[in-house]
Amino acid sequence: MLKRGLIALFFALLVTAVAGVTLSRHSAVEIARWWLPPDWTLDQLSELSLSWRGGSVERLAVTIPQGALLADKVQWQWQLRPNLQQPVTAVAVSSRRAVWRATQSSAVEVRPTAESTQHGFRLDDFRQASWWPTLASSSVVIEVLQLEMAEEALTVRMTHPVTFDRGALAAQSGDISVDLEWSRQSVNEWAGSLALTGSQSAQSQWRLSAFENAFAVTGDLLVPDLSASSSPFKLEVFPFTGGPAGSPLITAQAEVRLPLPAPLSSRHVTAEMMAVFSETGGGNATVTASRLESALPDERLSGRLEATWDGALDDIDITLPQAEIVLNDIDLGESQVSELRTAISGSLDPASRVFSLETSDTQIVVTGADWAADVHSSGLSVMASAEQQSMSGSLQIASRVDGRSFPGIDVIASASATGGAVQAELTGFAPWGSLGVLSAQYKEGESTRFEAKLDSTLWDWPSLQSTLSASIPELADIEIASLNLSLDASGEWRDEGVVATLSGQAREGYFSTAGLGVAGLKAAPFTLRVAGNEIVPVAPIELSLDAVNTGVTLTDLAGTVGKDDQGWLLIHADGSALGGELVIDQFRDFSSDGPLGTVYLNNIDLAAVVDIAGTEGVSIQGRATAALPLVWQSGMVLVDAGTLRGTPGFLQYQPSVDPAAIDQRVSAVAAALSNLHFEQLDADITLDESGVLFLQTSVLGNNPDYENGRQVKLNLTLENNLLSLLKSLQTIESVNLWVTRKFEQQH
């Protein structure tokens, strides 16, 4: 003991003497530079003080290739040892403030190679080195340590000395802070805690165990934003040389409970993760979805993601062999996904760094308030890279609206995304033919734009009718001989709804329904603006028809349709009817009760009117003009205060029954009408709710065969059930035959 003490005293005196002599002849900066590597620069060293127990520096600044270190109030303690190889060992270091600034340089990716990894990452066991006991027993206090790197800065505070056995650190970066504590539990075991607070928060309790050739860290991690319970983890490190051949460098295991993204956030999936890193840098990892927490018993989410890589990172293989998803009752607000089933597989191509994903046997059922859609796909393909993502595949869609089931349609879909822009295209096919193409474009921060072009086969009849008549029985009464209709749409989806422009044209319209026959319908090119539920024509729409048959045939019709604040209206129309002219102005739609407008019949042939009415025994010659104000009330068309004014003409009435047998007055009227040359024929017209047409008729004229041709004036009230009459004239069979003949005449 005495010998060792003398040696220590000798070294203390020697260090003090050398320090004194050296400092007297050279500056502290010059002395320090003797010991620095050639590429190191000592920028500042002020107030250096040395003693046999340690030393201090008021300010120290050093620049090295990797960065610069600045420290204030640096103090250290050393211990002199009777060891010629290591006579001095540091036992404690402290600083009031230290700043490390990393060198700013352009980032250059340095990929490992086979040559750089062939020796592996194993270390000699530093615990056997002579310096390890000294380091393990030393303490460090840096009150404030600031690390400045690129665009981030990390500040570490120590309020108490940090030793191998015990310590606490508080780190701050932006709004995120980290608190780390540890303490030695036994010779080879430590325990501690880690807390992360700020925009993200997490807590961990951990335990470190040291073994002969390995270290193991176990613990629990709690991330409140992700899970309501802590997740266990285990990390094993085999850093030293001399271990078993083929043993890994690092193994990691973890179990994580994560919520699914909205709108599935009420469901949680538990994933088990395992990773193995070899000493050459290669390894493999597996993530397995093992359990789905859901309030619905039949839901499932399972799958396994596998990854392997070599030390040079030249051969990376990532695969998703199989994943199964079964989810129900997903709330989407105004709609709901009542069922979602799919199987997924995928892989990553390391050469192109493209991730591919394929689905099979996908079934999605979406329901709304009064509709439902059943979507099935045998296969969808998704490809994604850092620059672009794309999707393609086919879908089969069946739908139900208001309790009616509609036949399925096939859709070929494709979509691609680059940056913040997405493009998609859908092509639809129905059992009766092609439906058309819908394309859409979305750019981040902008509304979604779309274009649609409906194919002409959408109007293919009778294929369309036979396919849809089971779902829409009303179609059974429609017969279309020909309809050439084109319709294109373009617009955008906004937050407030759809804003679009519809462009169309119609030709060769020959069809009939519910006793109404239309021949030669044409619509000049038109444009409609759609905003939400509002449809407004950009300009009046020009329509024309060769003929319309409602039991009464109207020909050569032409008109314009528009819209104002009160709704749709027929701005003007004219044509031929009953051998005369038909004129309509400002005729309203049938959206609400009230006046519709007035129908004018100019210079019509009274013989044609009598012929349609089928009045037995009546023959008439002459013409008339009528004005028929129409009113819409409770689903019926009424005539309110209509008028008819005739020009001079000739009337003969030959009843099948002898009027004298009925009544003397009837006999007199019949006699006057048997050969009446009328100068004036006027009538007030009313059509009531029951469909009865009343004509309060006044006739002024003479009969050369009656009372020597004296002038007579007759006031007659005529009535007929107009609805019954029209129904007798407009049977579906007769109107359909009329349309067919009209079509054949034109073709």
Image: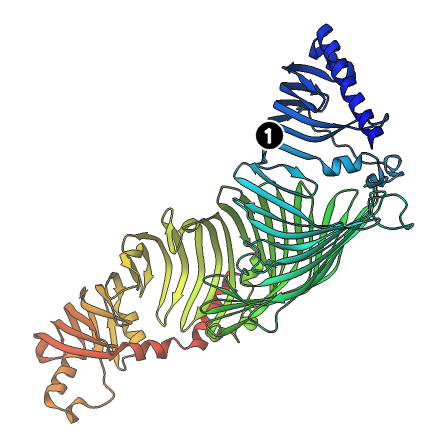
Q: Position of residue 571 (x, y in %)?
A: 30, 53
Residue located at (36% from left, 79% from top): 728
Q: Against 91, is 714 above or below?
A: below
Crowd tier of the residue under label 1, counting other residues whose Cα lies within 10 Å: few below 14, some 14–19, many 20 or above: many
* Direction from residue 710 to residue 652 in the image, left or right: right
Please name the amino acid that badge 1 sits on.
Gln
Q: Against 589, is 667 above or below?
A: below
* Direction from residue 78 to residue 155 in the image, left or right: left
Residue 120 visible somewhere in the drawing: yes
Dot 1 lies on which element? strand
Q: Position of residue 5 (x, y in %)?
A: 80, 28
Residue lying farthest to the front in this orientation: 2
* Direction from residue 528 to residue 508 in the image, left or right: right
Q: Nearer the viewer, residue 190 or 705?
A: 190
Q: Which residue is mark 1?
A: 146
Q: Nearer the viewer, residue 36 or 11?
A: 11
* Direction from residue 647 to residue 485 in the image, left or right: right
Q: Position of residue 555 (x, y in %)?
A: 37, 61
Q: Nearer the viewer, residue 297 or 438?
A: 297
Residue lying farthest to the bottom in this orientation: 661
